[in-house]
Every structure is written in C-alpha cells, then in structure tokens.
Image: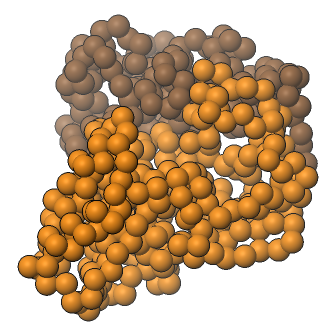
Chain colours: A orange, B brown
Amino acid sequence: MKPAPFSIHIPDTIDEAVACLAEHGEEARVIAGGQSLMAMLNMRLAEPSILVDVSRLADLKKLEIGPDGLTVGAATTQAEVFHHPDLATHMPLVREALTHVGHIQTRNRGTVCGSLCHADPSAEMPLLLATLGGTVTLQSASGTRTLSASEFQTGLLETAKQQGELCISAHFPSLPSSAKWGFREIARRDGDFAIVAMACIADKGTVRLGVGGVSDAPTVEEWPDLSTADIPDALNRLAWKMGGTDDIHASARYRRELVRRIGQKLIEETLS
Amino acid sequence: MKVLQHGQKHSVEFTLNGEEVEGFAEPRMLLSDFLRHEIGATGTHVGCEHGVCGACTVMMDGKAVRSCLTLAHQAEGREIRTIEGLETPDHEFNDLQQAFHENFALQCGYCTPGMLMTLSELASTGKRYTEAEVRDALSGNICRCTGYKEIVDAAMAVLGDKGQVAAE
C-alpha cells in the first residue's frame, strides 16, 4: 500500500507544466488534489514515473461565480467552491451535488477539475458538467482548446485530454431563472461512490435528466413536453439505452431499476 | 521548476502543532508515514491507506485532510496539526477530548485521532452544528467499535446548541 517510486516536478508556471508534460509524455501524471490519484498510486493501480504537481500554481486557482455560471481553475478545491458565498445564489444545483462528493477531508483537497479528468462514471462533477452543458479548457505546448462536456467525456476513466495537455479550467453554466432543478443519489454510505446519481433540470416544458453511475460516462436525455403519464415509459427506455454493467456495488439490473424509480421521484419533485 | 528525484530523500519542512519540523522524504512518501516514521509523531494512525477510513486525518492549514492521500512534500511550508497538538497548554484534554472521555466515545481508540481532527475543523469555526451536520462530517471516519452513537454524543456536547464554545 505504498506508491511505486516517482519523481515530483513542481512547475512555477502553466507553461512550465505543459512543457514538462510534453517532454515526459506517458511517464508523467498531473497531480492537483490527488484524492483519486493518491489512492490509485497507493494501490499501485497507477505507476507513473513523474508526478507534475500543479496544486500550488496561482494561475490555476481561479474561482469565478456569477450570473453566467461557475468557472473553476484546476487547482481550486471542491471545498473552496462549496464555501463560496455566491454559490447558493447562482449555482444551487452544483452546491447540492458537492455535498455528495466524498467527505469533508477529501473535498478539502480534491479539485473539481481533477474529478472531471479522473472521469469516474459515478462521480458527481462529471455528471453536472454533462447535465449543465459545461466546458473544459485544456492547454498544451501548442495552445489551448475548449471542449464541450460531450466532446470531453469519452468513457470509463477516459477523456479527450491528450498526452501533453493540462486541464486548466472548467465552466459550468448557470440555469435560467425560470428553470427548476433536482438532484438525487443512491450510495451505500454517505460520501461513497454513487450507485446511481441523477440531476434533473426542468424549464419551459422540457425535462433534461443526467444520469451517472450506470454507463461508462454520464448520460443526458432531454424530453420536450414530457407529461406525467409518459415519465415511466421514458425512464424505462433510458434505462435500457444505458444498459449498465454489474460490479461489486450493484447489478446492472438494480441500477436500471434505480433509474426508473428514483428517476420518477426526481422528475416529479423537480416539476412540482 | 523544482524537481524532486525518485530514490533520493529531499528536505521537507513545515509547522507541526506550532513548531517548525524538518525531515527527509523520498518523493513517494505519504504525509502519514512522514509524521509517524520521520518525525516520530505516532498519534496519527494509519488504517486503510487509500482514503476510505479517515483514521489518518490531520489538519492542514486549518482544514481536515487525509494524510494518506497527501504526499509529505505537499506539506512543505504548510501548517499541520495532529492529535498531539490538541491538548491545552496545561497538558489537559481540550473540550473535544474531554467530551470523548466523558461520553465513552472510544473503545480501542484506533479511529479516535482521525475523529478528533475532523471535529477540530468544525470546532475551529465557532459555529453550532446540528446532529445531522455532525453525522455528515463524521461520515468520512470509520469506527468499528462504538457504533458512532457515543462519538456523536461527544461531538454534540461540544459543537451542538448546548455545547461549550470550543473555538480557539
């Protein structure tokens, strides 16, 4: 339960960080909060020979919350976002979801962008990025590019981030004032990985539902003019579309049933 | 850019319970191991070593963190507080420790340092907490002896509506 040997590179600027990633390619992994990566290193599920520690880069400490949404830098912790005085006003759905992200101790170090890059299928931040239609900005030696959630999220622990690229920030758009929202999660224990997590947004007759924990990446479905009577059928079709896989925490069948039952409750309470 | 080569020990300095400490650590050394083996501060316990059990919780710059998910070198220049730093200047239990003592909030004691360090972050805010908030805060700390009731009782005795003010 000790990590395999690695060197630590501590860049002073973003440019130094991306140059370091470009030079060392596959050998290097970025560490910010390390709340997923450190566990993987301890269990030797990952054995990079270089860690590029970006946690102290002031340029990555961005945290802007306003009517347009939330922009969060790669070194900004989940706790910093959670405790921002304007979060509840502009991003109540993000605030609610953050209460389900790990525990106090992991939120104090874990970063929002780290969670997006780790891309655990049951994680809440990737689910919200997908449901809210957010973006991720990546920087490499050749420049920056901004990807939509659907472009960025490519699968199980996989993203479109290429070798040599550093995630520098993510943006979560806010909801129009007319929109209603809801969030529900089923986990064995408070703060554990979600078996199924769901975020729902209802606005002007359209219902959008994001589901995490079932497929390899968050799945978002949108129904215009969804009547109450149509909800069970819509959720059943969504459950079968996602499929899901059995694992130690739950069977695929159980997950699909959660999508039907918890999804029903969530959509109803969001619309009410 | 600072580079800490693998296989070599590099100096690590930080403030531990108000005192400057220095030691040497390979890049891969965990903060929990550094505290216990390099500094000799064995009050911080190591349970699962992958961030699940909370036994290794310490405070870093006033925030409760898992020392097994933190590298020793990431503590460079920071302010670390451990169970050894909780006692009063007269070497008595502080309010939280005393409440644990009075409420039988420990049996084997293995999880206790982590429990106390998590609750210390709450105590440092000076706010009052509901039982639900205390239980939520303690959800990241596993105890296999007490069934949590006594731990929550102890926490509420200090942090709840009727609790003494433990903010420092």
Q: Quadrant of the C terminus of chain A?
A: bottom left
Q: Residue at 34%, 75% (x, y): give it.
A: A221
Q: Image check: B24 left or right of A226?
A: right
Q: Is residue B117 visible?
A: no
Q: Position of residue A233 (x, y in %)?
A: 16, 72
Q: Nearer the viewer, residue B8 or A88?
A: B8
Q: Nearer the viewer, residue A192 or B130?
A: A192
For residue B162, above or below residue B127: above
Residue at (61, 60) in percent of width and height: A159
User: Is residue B35 shown above or below A59?
Assistant: above
Tell me: A182 left or right of B7: left
Q: Position of residue A133 (x, y in %)?
A: 47, 77
Based on the displayed image, in which of its 4 quarters is residue A88 positioned?
Answer: bottom left
Residue A103 seen in render: yes
In the picture as drawn, the residue positioned furthest to the left comes out as A229
Q: Which residue shows up at 83% across the image and 51% down it?
A: A25
The answer to whether residue A108 is above or below residue A226 is above
Q: Quadrant of residue B159?
A: top left
Which residue is the extreme one toward the bottom?
A204
Query: Where residue B86 sits in the image (x, y, percent)?
Result: 48, 22
What number of labels is visible? Answer: 0
Apparent side of residue B16 relative to residue A130 in the rendered image (left or right): right
Q: Quadrant of the N terminus of chain A?
A: top right
**Which residue corresponds to the image point at 40% horizontal and 18% vertical from the top-left?**
B111
On screen, B12 above or below A254?
above
Q: Nearer the viewer, residue A157 or A189?
A: A157
Residue A141, position in %: x, y?
A: 87, 66
